[in-house]
Image (spheres, rainbow, N blue to C red):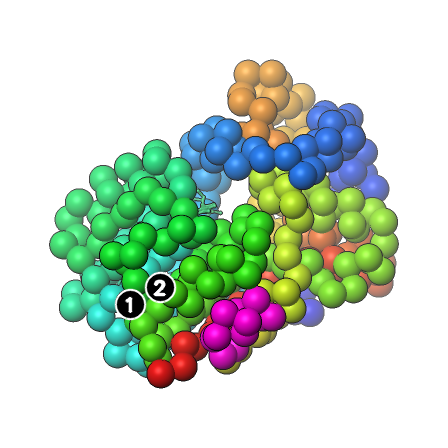
Amino acid sequence: MPHAKTTPFAMPLPEALAHVDRVFGIDAILADEGTDILKPYYVQSEPGYKRVHSEKGCMHMALNPDGVYTADGYFAQIRDVAYQIRQVQGTSVLELGSGMGFNTIALAPDHPDVQFTGLDLMEHHVKTANKDAGHLPNATFRQGSYTDIPADLHGADVVFGLETLCYAEDLDAVAAQIAGAMAPGGRFVMYDGFRRADFDAAPEDVRTAARLFEVTTAVTGGFHMIEAWEAALTRAGLVVLRSEDLTDQSIAGMRYLHNRAAKFFRSWKYRVLKHVMPKYLIRNAVAGLVGPYMIEGAGPNSGDTMGAITYSVLMAEKPR
Ligand SMILES: C[S@@+](CC[C@H](N)C(=O)[O-])C[C@H]1O[C@@H](n2cnc3c(N)ncnc32)[C@H](O)[C@@H]1O
């Protein structure tokens, strides 16, 4: 893994888990596993995403292939989607879980002949996105769920979702919705976190880091395995064209957030925020702190590099 230029870990994993336990209680966080906290999490977290991510409204991980964090990394996934639009000469694009609109708002100006629609569960995200897209005649955002994609959005040449399909519960049902929304010959692209197929073989503290990350980002059912998504998309009639582990590229961004979070855990001045800020918002600091361990293992410096989670891309095509 290309660690040479990457910011080092702020502390070893046992110290990080001790910090989390002292400030929040590991058991108290994990008690939310299997419960539905999606809506309060996103209502409370919006200001946090706006502050911590350097790009306005961006709610996904940066990908920095050369191992140095830069905000340009937030556009890596978007450039891939743009490539797919060109490949199929698309005229309509549907973004699932479009959040505050960062991706579609970045894509729309470069593709004036393409109609973009973003679909998101959270009304306040849709409102923010529509406000920020006011100057774009070819981008609109709607409230709705990818578990029930409105029929008038069907026929999209490209359907994509960045770090949103981790929240899907019934993969077959959502895969069928995705396939139903795609035009024949259309492309589907998703970027997300996934549990590794050998998740259970990872060291216990690495699995604990992964579970803490999952719960504190509201993925309370745990990340899916990419193999499960591949199978569901295939059963829905799509042909998987690409399934690639990009974890290396997410390391720099994860470590950047980790070092910011470490400041919170180390300083009492920051820790008092826990008492004044909403619970799910402040718990994002846990995800920030433990993120690198779940993808890189307990300590790349000590040689223990077995992670439990990958950051990957999955792409599929709907046959004509
Ligand atoms: C981590 S954010 C990513 C937002 C956006 N894709 C981005 O890259 O900035 C996940 C988004 O998925 C949305 N979401 C979760 N479940 C959803 C569902 N069933 N249908 C539509 N959106 C959903 C959330 O409201 C949130 O905006």
Q: Is residue 285 visible?
A: no
Which picture quadrant has residue 36?
Answer: top right
Q: Nearer the viewer, residue 31 or 292?
A: 31
Q: How many marks?
A: 2
Q: Are marks 1 and 2 in contact (CB under 8 Å)?
A: yes
> Residues in magenta?
230-240
Q: Residue at x 35, y 34 (%)?
A: 124
- Place of residue 33 in the rendered image (x, y in percent of width and height, measured from the top left): 69, 38
Q: Is mark 2 within 8 Å of ligand 1?
A: no
Q: Is residue 190 visible?
A: yes
Label 1, secondary structure: give it: loop
Q: What residue sits right under mark 2 in the picture? A: 181
- Place of residue 203 in the rendered image (x, y in percent of width and height, measured from the top left): 85, 54
Disc number at residue 155?
Answer: 1
Q: Residue at x 85, y 49 (%)?
A: 204
Q: Is residue 186 above or below residue 60?
A: below
Q: Residue at x 41, y 76 (%)?
A: 318
Q: Amino acid at mark 1?
A: Gly
Q: Is residue 308 above or below residue 283?
A: below
Which of the two discs, 1 and 2, labels the residue nearer the N terminus?
1
Q: Amino acid at mark 2?
A: Ala
Q: Residues within 10 Å of mark 1 (few under 14, many from 20)?
A: some
- Place of residue 240 in the rendered image (x, y in percent of width and height, measured from the top left): 52, 77
Mark 1 to mark 2 CA distance (whole Å): 6 Å
Q: Residues within 10 Å of mark 2 (few under 14, many from 20)?
A: many
Q: Residue at x 58, y 50 (%)?
A: 169
Q: Is mark 1 within 8 Å of ligand 1?
A: no
